Every structure is written in C-alpha cells, then in structure tokens.
Image: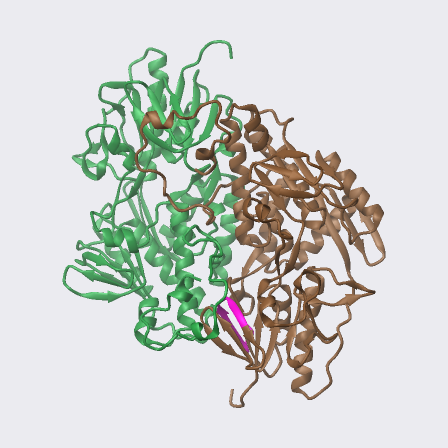
Chain colours: A brown, B green
Amino acid sequence: MTEKRPTVVIVGAGFAGMHAAKALREAPVKVVMLDRNNYHLFQPLLYQVATAALAPSEIAYPVRAIFRKQKNFEFRLAEALNVDLDGKAVYTSNGPISYDYLILAVGGETSYFGLDSVARNGFDLKDLEDAMILRNHILRMFEGASQEKVPHVLRALRTFVVVGGGPTGVECAGALSELIRLALSKDFPGMNFKDDRVILLEAKERLLAGFPEDLAQSAATTLQKKQVEVRFGAEVVEYDGRQVRLRSGEVIPTCTLIWAAGVRSESLMDKLGLEQKSQGRVVVEQTLQIPGYPEAFVAGDCVYLEEDGKPLPMMAPVAIQQGKIAARNIERLIADKSVEAFDYRDPGSLATIGRNAAVARVRKFKFRGFLAWLVWLAVHLFWLIGFRNRLVVLINWAWDYFLYERAVRLITPDGSLPKKDQPETVLPEEIERVTEDRPINLALLEL
Amino acid sequence: MTEKRPTVVIVGAGFAGMHAAKALREAPVKVVMLDRNNYHLFQPLLYQVATAALAPSEIAYPVRAIFRKQKNFEFRLAEALNVDLDGKAVYTSNGPISYDYLILAVGGETSYFGLDSVARNGFDLKDLEDAMILRNHILRMFEGASQEKVPHVLRALRTFVVVGGGPTGVECAGALSELIRLALSKDFPGMNFKDDRVILLEAKERLLAGFPEDLAQSAATTLQKKQVEVRFGAEVVEYDGRQVRLRSGEVIPTCTLIWAAGVRSESLMDKLGLEQKSQGRVVVEQTLQIPGYPEAFVAGDCVYLEEDGKPLPMMAPVAIQQGKIAARNIERLIADKSVEAFDYRDPGSLATIGRNAAVARVRKFKFRGFLAWLVWLAVHLFWLIGFRNRLVVLINWAWDYFLYERAVRLITPDGSLPKKDQPETVLPEEIERVTEDRPINLALLEL
C-alpha cells in the first residue's frame, strides 16, 4: 500500500464488530480489531455448552481464521481499558492504539441490580468461561449427590434455580431439565430422579417479554411439560450459595442459582463520560455516531436506540445490522457522502425449549412446537461460523436427538479452581470428619 | 442382588483401570471405580490437544457413559489419598471406601529429576489441564509476538524447546512445528516465520529408546525435514521461564519449555510403604499382586515388572493387558482357582512425526513414512472410545490434512489464570509504561 489509508479500530469481536469488519472488506481503510479473547463467540448457544450439549470449540471460532483472507484486517489480542475520544486513541492492556475512525462494539455484561450476594454466589452465562464453570458445577452436583446421604444436603444439590424468564432463562431451564431427565438419569442408574427440581423464577407475570403473549404462554406450558417449575412474581432478594430468598420471604435451598435476569452495557462504556440510558447503554445519534464525535461509532448491545418508543433489544440481529451500518457510514464519511440513519429490520424472535419444542416469530408469522424447533435449528446452523463447526454441531445435535444423549458431560479445568492445590497428605482421621450433620460436603464439591 | 457380592475397588480410570472394570463385567462382584476426573483420558493424543488439533472433549470420555450398561459398576468422583492395605480401605477426598479386592491403577506423573526451576517454569503434558494450558500459552506467544518489536523478546517468544526424545517429545515437536509452519503462518500473514525455532533436546545420543535404531534415525531425519532442530547430548540444568541453560553452559532464550523427559509412578504409590524400583514403580509379584497382600493388585504405569531384564515401558498396551490380568486373577481368587502370571505380549510401538510421517514397529515388522502414518491413524482411531468421538476426530483430522488447518486455535479458560481479575481502572499514563527496554511484555502474555 502506498497511500496512507485511514485506520478503523473496532473494539470487540462479537456480532457487531465482526460484521462491521467484514463490511469494510473492500474499503480503502486499515481495520484493526481488538478483543480480550482470540475468538468470536456464538453467544446464543452458550447455554448449550453450559448444559453439556456442545463443546466450547464448537461455538467459538478464532478471529484470525475468520479474517484470514481479508487483506486490510489486523487483529490484536488486548483488552480495551479506556477510550480517549478527543485524542482518538484506545487504551488497551497492551498500550494505546490510535484511530481515525472507531467502532465500539464491546457488548454487554451481566447486571445483578445491586444484588451482591447473587453476584458472588450465583452463576451467569455471558462468556465461554461462565459456561464451562456452570457445566462443571452442574455435573459436580450429581457426582456429589451420588455420594451424599443427608436429605437436606441432597435437596440443595439437586435443586437448580434459573432466574429470569427471557430467552436465555427459558432456553437454559429447558435444556437443564432435559440434561437431567434424559441423559444424567442414565448416567446415575441407582439414583431417584423424581426429586430433581429445575425452577424458573420470573419477577413479572409472563415469560419472554419480547414475544407475542400467546407464544409466551405456550413456552410456559411446554416448560411445565418438561418438568420445569415456572414461578411468576418471584423476585430474588438474596442468595448465599446454599439457599435463595425471595421477596415473599420464601426460601428455596439450592447449590445452583443461574442468573439470567439482567444484562447491561459492558462497563467500559461507563468510563467515557457519555450520556447513558437504561442498562448503561450509550445514547448515540440515529447514525450510530457518538454526539460530538462524528468519527466514533457505537454498535450492538451497548447502544441505546429506541424504536416505537421502546429501546431495541440486546440481540444478535440488532448488533449485526448496526455493525454493518457503522461500517457503511465510515465508508461514506471517507467518500465525503452523508451518513445514513439506522433503521432496524426486525427478522423476528426465537427461543427453544428443548427437544422438538420452540417458539418463533418470523416477521408476522408465529410458530410453535416442532415446526418452530426446525426453524430454530436452521437459523442457528446458518449463523454459526465455519463449515466444520456446522458439521460437528449437526452431528452432536443429531446424536443427542436420536440417542437422548449429551456429548460433553466432562468436568474439565475451567479457571474456577486452582490447579492441583489439594492438600498433600491427609491423615485418615482427618478424612473421617465426614459426619452426618455437616451442612454441605464442600470437600467433594470443590474436588 | 440378594447374595453379598465382594467389592472390587479400582483406583484410576486410565487404560488399566478401565480395562480391568470391563473385564469384570460378568463377574460376581460389585465394581467401584474412583478417579479425580469424571472421564477416561486418551493420553496418547494429549499432544494433539496441546497443539490445537483436537478439542479436549474429543479425547476424554465420561466414565459413566462408558459403563452405563454394566450393572455391577459404580463410579465415585474422588481423589485417592492413601490406602490402608491391612485394613482394606482406600482413603479418598470424600471419605474411606472399604474393599475386598483392590486394583491400584493410578498411572504416572511427570518427573523432573529434582530440577525445581523446570518444574516451576516449564510445561508438561500429563493431563487435560496441562494440554489446555500449553495450547493457550503457545497461541499467546504468537499473539504477543505480533505486537512485539524488541528483537531479543521476539526471539524468546518464538523459540519453543521440547525436552526429551521419547515418543511424547518427538510427537509434540513434530506437531508443534507443523502447527506453526502450516496453520499459524496463515493466521499471522504479516509475520516472518523463518525465525521460529522448535528445538528438541535429548540428553542421550539417540531418539525413541524403545524403537529399533534405524527407525529412530529415520524419525530424527523426518523431524529435521519438518524444521525441528534435533540436538543430542543436550542436558537441561535450569530454566527460569525466559531462558534454558544446558549442562554445556549454552543458554537458549525461550518462553516455552515443554518437559517430556521424565515420568514416574503417581506419588500416591510412595505413601504405601512398598518396595519401589526405578521411577517410583512398585515391585509386585508376577501375578500383579502386592507381596503379602494377595487381594491387592497393581496395574499400569505404577507397576515395576521386568521382561528380558528390562522394565516394561510405561505405555497403554502394557496397562491394558495388566488391567485385564488383574481382573481375571480376582475372578480366579473368588472361584478358588490359582492366579496367573502376567506375560506381556508386545504389539509393537508407534510414533507419529506429523503429516504423512511416522515410525512403527508392529511385532517384527518395521514401517516408516506414509505407511507407518496410516497404521498410526488406524490404531488410534480404533482405540479411541465412543463412535461419536471417532467420527469427530476423523473429521477434524481429514479437515486439517486437506486444508493444512488446525481446528482448535482457541485461547480458552484453563485454570492457569484467575477469572477476570484484571485491574479495574488503569490510567493512560500507567499503560504507557510499555517501553522499549522491558524484558518481556507480561501484561499481554497473561491477559
């Protein structure tokens, strides 16, 4: 390259960032993408990793592999720590990077609404590590239960509480109930699986707020058929890792609380001194530009934009379309053309509840049951990156479907526990402290 | 079950333990297997996880899935901490387990021969966690190198030292060189890959001690063709994480030392007060019984037995055959028959050096090159557990073979670093400490 091309820095390799970078394929720019992970994560299937249906490598694809053929693309493994909008530089864990144009597409993170005890003791489902930690934990609960005799401990080990009736909570509760009743019940032949509980707690009076009312009702019925207890008006106020307390005063003993009740903009966005609205999302022009900084764009979950008076959902289709528009507007700026306003074209919504069951709205059409489930399968396979991933995911899904199996029931290293820091020598007397009245056998759970 | 069946406790879900449990399928016993992991690991392919060719779930298979149909089988997720041979009990992280018969099949661990600095700063390759940590580290070296300017730092980042010319060292060095030159060179198009070094250090004067001399020479030549520097008479004395020092005084700067030079019996065996010979392996009767304890058997890597005056190798075929004999001898004891002596039937040895290249001895026949590689492929696919694993591994291998790719170039959570404990707020001034004279950019490497 002889001419000096302007540098477009894209922060984040999620749906928005990736589609922005792709859209700049032919543009006369140098694209520099940075992310703290070296892969693009297919977040909509994260709950399948958490419930042992897919392996982490099946929903994560190396960024460098995706962009291998894109000549104007560069990747940097680094965490964005701050942005100097006036000085046009992104500060990263590996030094500052200057830009001519910027696309901030850092996504969302879990929001606990100030419930510190839940943040500390609960599980969430936003990245690959969360999913692996949760999978390992769920499997450890059953290994623990198989060696446990004390009734109240057993009850806590085998009760799973999912909080939040949005798509993530619904999909997670459905998949978890099927993992337990279809696959684990065969792994633990001596165990009675009637006592296992999967409870979905929703603070409001309905599931799937973004879906039509009748589909939401149909989802609740299907979950109940799959032996998920769906509870409405159930607001969590505290969780100590052993029992969850609701606003009503009710206490549910459980070693597993999965928090799928809140997301907000990635906290990096709080540092930029910009106007933020609900969920910490940043207010931008309709063109996705940051007010006062025409060269700086925001795309995806961290953007606050309204449509028909309601904020756009934090979903992949919004992120993809915004990433593309941000990229196109940068091209227009370079070509001295006027920028375009973002206009969301809603492709619909999908949520799966397990085998043969889903709810789907595709434009104005509504589907449920088996047909919706086929739509869900097709859409997810289509959007998954890489033909090999699609092939392997399809094999795993087909296998599980026909054999009522789960592929990845492995308790693998996940960063939640230090490697092999077991006590070196334990005397038999010490070990036999395992008595009948201890609350929960932590020694085993944290093996 | 009305009659009281004797309990056979099998410690370890490796090759020996697994084949012992399978052999007891029809026996009038209750089998209790315990392991600190909930999976059987196909150790011979561990180096392929470390070099991003296979995903962890492709070489690990849940123990409960393997034995799902075996009615007399029970699994306990627990670590064995000690054995009371007189009291017939195994002490575990989850309490004591009594046995009538015992099979100790706890396998081996890495031996550093007292080189503490290597143990602290080097990488080894004995379990799934080791392999994931090593894979992530190797990929981080290239991500780091792509953002590094200082020549001596770059050199250390892009020099990989493998210590030990046995099968693990040879396979690992070959696979690593191919990962770098065939796959990563495409991921980092701007980088010059001529400077990358993979160095295989062997203290003695030949590779693959258990193989015929001509095959060992052929392996060395093939490694050199694949751009591995093979060094003989090179003994490591110290490694500080940045440079390795040899007995000769020579110093090689490297951020990656992979130790494949020593294995020994799992250290649990040191606690039992039994006679141990080289590598901490326990002396047993030819029947695999512990002298003085006819109901207690040992099988696999932790057994010391000689054949033709030489100790048997610590290899899967030995472990499999010993596991079966230990099981059969327990059946004979129960049936009041006399126990049998173990007699190793040597099926041969195999080592692969990468694409189209391997060395193999099958009984008296020797193979090398493409033919040996086909033998290697067939043998490993055959022994892999589970049809789905075989299918997925075959797809990955075929894909990599035809496209010169590597499936799993992901830097995933592995337990080597704490989850998201990055500094919360870093001021721009602080970040710009990245100067030209710092030794190694740890901030990036440990992102």
Picture quadrant where residue A240 is located: top right
Identify the residue shown where x is 41% and y is 56%: B135
Image check: B70 left or right of B36? right
Q: Nearer the viewer, residue A334 or B313?
A: A334
Picture quadrant where residue B303 is located: top left
Image check: B336 left or right of A383? left
* A431 is higher (above) or lower (below) than A447: above
Q: Position of residue A134 (x, y in %)?
A: 55, 44
Residue numbers of the magenta segment: A69-82
* B30 is higher (above) or lower (below) than A33: above
Residue A51 among magenta residues: no
Identify the residue shown where x is 25% and y is 23%: B290
Residue sitting at the far top: B3
Q: Nearer the viewer, residue B232 or A258?
A: A258
Can residue B181 be seen in this snapshot?
A: no
* B428 is higher (above) or lower (below) than A194: below
Q: Nearer the viewer, residue B419 or B363?
A: B419
Image check: A219 left or right of B75? right
Identify the residue shown where x is 72% and y is 86%: A337
Image check: B134 left or right of B236? right
Residue A73 among magenta residues: yes
* B407 is higher (above) or lower (below) than B440: above
Q: Position of residue B206 (x, y in %)?
A: 20, 54
Quadrant into which the C terminus of chain A falls: top left
Picture quadrant where residue B20 is located: top left
Q: Position of residue B110 (x, y in %)?
A: 29, 45
Can residue B371 be seen in this snapshot?
A: yes
